[in-house]
Amino acid sequence: MSEPATQYAPHYTWGDYQTWDDNQRWEIIDGDAYLMSPSPTSRHQRIVGEMHRQMANYFKGKPCRLWVSPMDVVLSEEDVVQPDLLVVCDPGQITRTHVSGAPALVVEVLSDSSVFRDRRLKTRLYARSGIKEFWLVTPWPSMVEVFVLRGEHYEVHDILGKEQTLISPSFPELQVALKDVFDFPLEPGEEPPVAKEPPAPKYGY
């Protein structure tokens, strides 16, 4: 009796990626291809735009360059990503078509379709690729998680809310006012968090 044929999942590379249709945005992680959302939400773009504005003011005239998506970042032959924002300090990494190797800082803004990929797959990829600082931005409830590479893994450096100012551990003079980043109207069903004090103790006689 013959054995059934073994089914192999496609394993994609940077070479494959360069032949694909430019009208679609893809990422490759560990050789697996992920189709990106064709059009990010207005909230997502508002966050990216404001973070870019504040960060660009800091990096203007400095050796490190700030880039905004879409910009291909080739971390290996089997890992190609498009972070929302990235900082590159080595001009030798910048080619005409892409960034080669690990940026100094990467920012990802979560969307409903990318939560698992950004929070799990790309976090692991960025750590093993040697990206020293990684910001993970959650639009609502509004917060930014700042990760710093320690050895082969990320440690949480800080978690900041809407009323706080983000200070980069890699670039201490880079400060981002999150009240401006998260300045958008709430959608139906979203309510601002309310701090509740515990009830006062009751005393009886």
Image: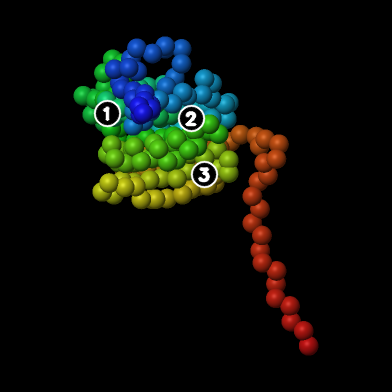
Q: Mark 1 or mark 2, which is nearer the start of the sequence?
A: 2
Residue 61: x and y in percent read 31, 27
| Viewer-proximal residue among 2 and 95 | 2
Q: Seen from this angle, which residue lies furthest bottom?
A: 205
Q: Amino acid at mark 3?
A: Met
Q: Amino acid at mark 1?
A: Ser
Tell me which residue sits at (26%, 18%) in the image: 95
- What is the number of the mark on residue 76? 1
Crowding at mark 2 (Cα within 10 Å: few <14, some 14-19, many 20+): many
Tell me which residue sits at (66%, 60%) in the image: 196
Does residue 96 appear in the picture of this structure?
yes
Q: Amino acid at mark 2?
A: Val
Residue 10: x and y in percent read 36, 23
Residue at mark 2 to residue at mark 1: CA–CA distance: 26 Å
Tell me which residue sits at (47%, 24%) in the image: 36
Q: Mark 3 or mark 2, which is nearer the start of the sequence?
A: 2
| Viewer-proximal residue among 115 and 205 | 115
Quadrant of the rendered image containing residue 42: top right
3 or 1: mark nearer the eye: 1
| Viewer-proximal residue among 90 and 22 | 22
Residue 33: x and y in percent read 40, 25
Quadrant of the rendered image containing residue 175: top left
Residue 35: x and y in percent read 46, 23
Q: Is residue 59 left or right of residue 53?
A: left
Q: Mark 1 or mark 3, which is nearer the start of the sequence?
A: 1
Look at mark 2 in the image and give the residue it sits on: 48
| Viewer-proximal residue among 87 and 18 | 18
Q: Quadrant of the C terminus?
A: bottom right
Label 1 sits on a secondary structure element that is strand
Look at mark 3 in the image and give the residue it sits on: 143
Residue at mark 2 to residue at mark 3: CA–CA distance: 14 Å
Tell me which residue sits at (42%, 41%) in the image: 120
